[in-house]
Image (tube, rainbow, N blue to C red):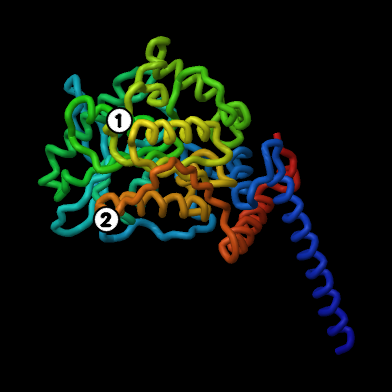
Amino acid sequence: MMRLRAAFKNIFLISSVFVALMLVVISAAVFLWQTTEEGRLPAKTAVVLHAINNNLVDLDINITPPRIVSGEKGGSPTILKEDIFMPVQGDVQIPARIYRPRGEGPFPIVMYYHGGAFMEGFGNLDTHDNIIRSVASRTNSIVIAPSYRLAPEHIFPSAVEDSYTALQWAVSNADSLNGDIEKITVMGDSAGGNIATVVAQMTRDRNGPELLSQVLLYPLTTFQEVPLASRDIYDSGYYLLSRSVMYRARDAYTPEEWMWSHPYTSPLHSEDLSGLPPALVITAEFDPLRDEGEQYAELLHDHGVSVRTSRYRGVMHGFISFYEVMQSGRNGMHEAASFIKQANQDQLVFTDEYQLQVRQPPQGMERVREQTEAFAIAAYLLGRSGADIFINE
């Protein structure tokens, strides 16, 4: 009996030492991943970026994030999904995805334009399906996401013309969709944010359809060479968008230099933004597009457009796509959905002065949860790849 007790005691001690060593290893790994030249990252952001940039899981800018740690279940069963083809200019049919609530309606309409640098291989309906689905569920709206034609085969203005025509199609078919043409929002992320606000300009310039609001998630707003600190600081690509990709996008989508200053490619340099619908602009701290998004929001305000601007600290470009994994992504998604619902209910309130709201990383119990989940993900990554994942390439 004494020997058995001693054996159990030794096993317990060995197990305790092993667990303690693993905690030290995991803590050291997370600390290293958090430490960057551009600043210290929150733990969750750090481990997600490490996984993406080291190809440790199928989690990158082109792929919907897996539910390593999911804070939200899948789409509501009350939301119907339909993939269709819709006609655009030149007798062309483009794919589109529609999520719509069950019931008689009429329901508000959201036109969602996906990101992806305007180029083939960088974004499509599937890479953004979780956002499209979530917006429909959270706002009780019909969300129509057209798959506009992409460069290099189709250069400017194909993408924006397709997107505007898709809006016209939505209005023409609103009755069959149980949609309310008095409550239409345009929304998009990154390149899609550019398209959304350009479509808003096109509706003004072409006398409709009328829009209720616009929601721009970390939008690209200029193709010109202008001094922007965020483009210089975060241009490596580690934060999911690189300067080289931006140059490739410009060369592919706007191959002629005159296109770079057109208001339908570079709305930041538009001479007239008056008459556009109220806007929500969301930016990310660690994002090369941060400054131009915020400058565009301020320019909208200067032209008499009601605008809210939110910068989320501690996150990277595209962070709302990872709302199933990151609390800041969930917060950003919630803010966007709340803005749309307020617009639909005529409850938007703005201040006279332009304000940039800085949203802090999760605090309190949310921070504890994020830290715990970050360590769990780190343990998973370490288990997959071994000790060599400490070394950042």
Q: Nearer the viewer, residue 98 or 350?
A: 350
Q: Nearer the viewer, residue 335 or 268?
A: 268
Snapshot quadrant of residue 321: top left
Residue 272 in the image: x percent, y percent? 32, 24
Furthest residue to the front?
352
Residue 140 marker? 2
Secondary structure beneath disc 2?
A: loop
Instruction: Rate crowding at label 2 as few (under 14), some (14 to 19) or many (20 or more) other CA atoms within 10 Å.
Output: many
Residue 209 in the image: x percent, y percent? 18, 35
Query: In the rendered view, would you say 96 is above or below 346?
Result: above
Q: Is residue 277 visible?
A: yes
| Residue displayed at 58% across by 37% down | 239
Q: Nearer the viewer, residue 332 or 88?
A: 332
Residue 188 marker? none
Taking 362 as reference, is 343 left or right?
left
Mark 1 or mark 2: whose residue is earlier in sequence: 2
Snapshot quadrant of residue 267: top left
Taking 307 as reference, is 162 left or right?
left
- Tag 1: amino acid: Ser
Q: Is residue 80 visible?
A: no
The quarter of the picture where the C terminus appears is: top right
Q: Nearer the viewer, residue 239 or 346?
A: 346
| Residue displayed at 57% across by 57% down | 362
Residue 27 in the image: x percent, y percent? 74, 55
Q: Which residue is mark 1?
A: 274
Q: CA distance from mark 1 to mark 2?
A: 29 Å
